[in-house]
Image (cartoon, grey):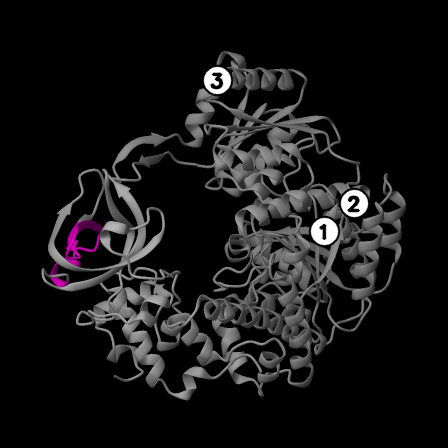
Amino acid sequence: MTTRLEDNFRPGDRKNLAKRGVHTVTDLFRFFPRRYLVPGERTELGALPLGETAIIQAEVISVNTRRMKQRRGTITEVIVHDGQQSMKIAFFNQHWLEKTLTPGLTVVFGGKVESYRGQLTLASPAWLNRTEDDHEWTPDDLNSPFPIYPAVKKIAQSRLWGAIKTLLRVAGSEEFEDPLPKGLREKFDLPDLRTALEDMHKPRTIEDVERARQRWKWEEALALQTEFASRKASFAAVQATPLLTRGPKSRRFDESMPFTLTPSQVTVGEEIGEDMARDQPMHRLLHGDVGSGKTLVALRAMLTAVDSGAQAAMLAPTEVLATQHFHSIQRLLGEQMALSPLLSDDDQVTVALMTGSMPARERRELALDLATGNIDIVVGTHALLSESTIFESLGLIVVDEQHRFGVEQREAMRAKGGVTTPHTLVMSATPIPRTVAMTVFADLDVSTLTEMPAGPKDIATHVVPIVAQPAWFARVRALMRETIEAGRGVFVVFPRIEPSDIEDPETGEVTGQKQGIEDLSRKLEDTPELAGTRFGLLHGRMSTGEKDKVLKDFSAGDIDVLVSTTVIEVGVDVPRATMMVIAEAENFGVAQLHQLRGRVGRDGSAAMCFMLTELSEDNESYARLQAVAETLDGFALAEYDLDSRGEGDVISGSQWGGSSLRHLSILRDSEIVAEAKTVAEQIVAVDPSLEAVPALRAFIRRVLPEDDAHFIEAG
């Protein structure tokens, strides 16, 4: 047997392994068991302890495979006998076992003992024979944890385990080059790579497994923190133009503000100002709760850039959001915003909007104004990244929160700064728990807005179980009518544009259809409470012009009820809207629900939010909705979300795109993360290119693939 995967598995097997993320021997070594059986002693069939894990050794009497009646797939029933008693054991969708588990074969099975129709059986059984010819077990075998791997189609557990053990024995030293420096392993009592792999695949005790798992956490923590330390070092090595002038534009803006900055806005403004005054590029994250005034802080930073003789650009992920930011800046500047570059006073600011849907002629004219320095601030989408968009002197980039700012995009934008690198401010509208900021955004300096400019919001939030309490939904519609009659606007948010099939989870058969957004809108219009009210629709398949018109009509009061998808989740600012109704609320995450709720009451008025659900109160997701209803504190909800969903979802799903972190828990392992940060900074300080630790460098690329390593996405 060689150490090449193709010499150990047939092409079909390799294809099935690839679906599990196993493409190389290294991948196979890190294809860890999902659980272990620790059974103690082999037990006779007649004395199996109900509810406990057990191992049985018995002779196969018969095997029969049939198709299941109530669900898709097959069931293979194996009857075994230990000389005194027989037992039936069922395997689902493993029909190939019929050819292998032949009558007369002595087998070893493990699993949890359960009762089915009055007879004992094994739940989720595992066939434990080392090979088809391995019939006898020693006491050591029975006392060692037995690895149970994630199922791989058409590959028996025994064959997978056998291949891994053999490869561990014959693999060359290149497979065991350790990403963790020896000194670190000794300091924290961590096993070397070969030992840890053997402890995972053939442990002597369950303590061996736990010791190895601690090592995997350290690997991932060190990879993350070394990547972040390397980024910080590379940022520090490039030149930026210091932006330190508070000139006529900044002074006029501050003097004309009709309100006082919150203490945290003042503090954050000073942090940003100090960064921008340096000749190294700022790389800062600005986050805070919904309505905490991030746009105002960003605008003050952009005005400082303009007063210093530079241009500023705000990058947003969608045209709706870019347009909203443009209008917010326009409203904040008021008369200080110049009508055109030719009609601009010294203390006025020229601001432009650039999107992909702009007519070609307008875009060419805007590109010329940017290239000649006639535009001070530009707000735009990916159109800003095109080669044809050139700046005379780009000094500051503000990146809106949902934009994925990847390697190529970041470099494309930074290159527009010319000989120096622009300063960068990344905004997140989602409050970020401290542990997440430390782990996921460790390459950025973090600024937090902790107060609300207009004081605490007054949004009464309620969960409405429309199946259990249908009268409550009628009351919600009556409140919608009252809100409209008071001259206010109502948002109704829905998770789907088109209708979708309802499938039976067991059979896959279509049993019905979920309504689409137009169906919901028509049903609401036809209710007696909302008869005669003016409805509008907004969703992602509409053109930019259509979206803008609908939002403008809703803002002006020409639309009473705006039925929308989550395109209004972030940035949309309609001061007259004081009621939010979220249909099928269980389909939205905690952060989304909080963001959606933040679209109402933006002028300080008392507002209402109703989360409609068909779930019953004993459903786990109902508790999540109730948690949102009980607090308006976005930071508390962010902590709740992290705790309830798990950081795997929060980081991998939202922050890291395709990263393959599997073992590190930013909640439970914060001490490891902090220790790894110190070690990583020491490594990068003496070896910025990681030449002396090639195994660590290779592991970083494995955990954080090049395409994803520099993505920033606040979710």
User: What's the residue at 64%, 30% (across, down)?
Assistant: 555
Q: Residue at x 67, y 48 (%)?
A: 431
Image location of residue 95, percent across then percent down: 17, 55
> CB under 8 Å between callouts 2 and 1?
yes
Instruction: Name the residue beneath numbered marker 1.
Output: 351
Q: Position of residue 101 (x, y in %)?
A: 14, 61
Closer to the N terminus: mark 3 or mark 1? 1
Q: Which residue is mark 3?
A: 470
Q: Which kind of residue does numbered mark 2 sit on?
A: Leu
Q: Residue 41's image quarter?
A: bottom left
What amino acid type should be assigned to the residue bearing mark 3? Pro
The residue located at (85%, 53%) in the rendering is: 250
Instruction: Tell me if residue 91 is in the magenta stretch.
Output: yes
Q: On the rendered structure, is 191 left or right of 166?
A: right
Residue 232 belongs to the span the image colors magenta: no
Question: Is disc 2 placed on a helix, strand or loop?
Answer: helix
Q: Quadrant of residue 486?
A: top right
Q: Vertically, is 642 above or below 206?
A: above
Location of mark 2 (residue): 333
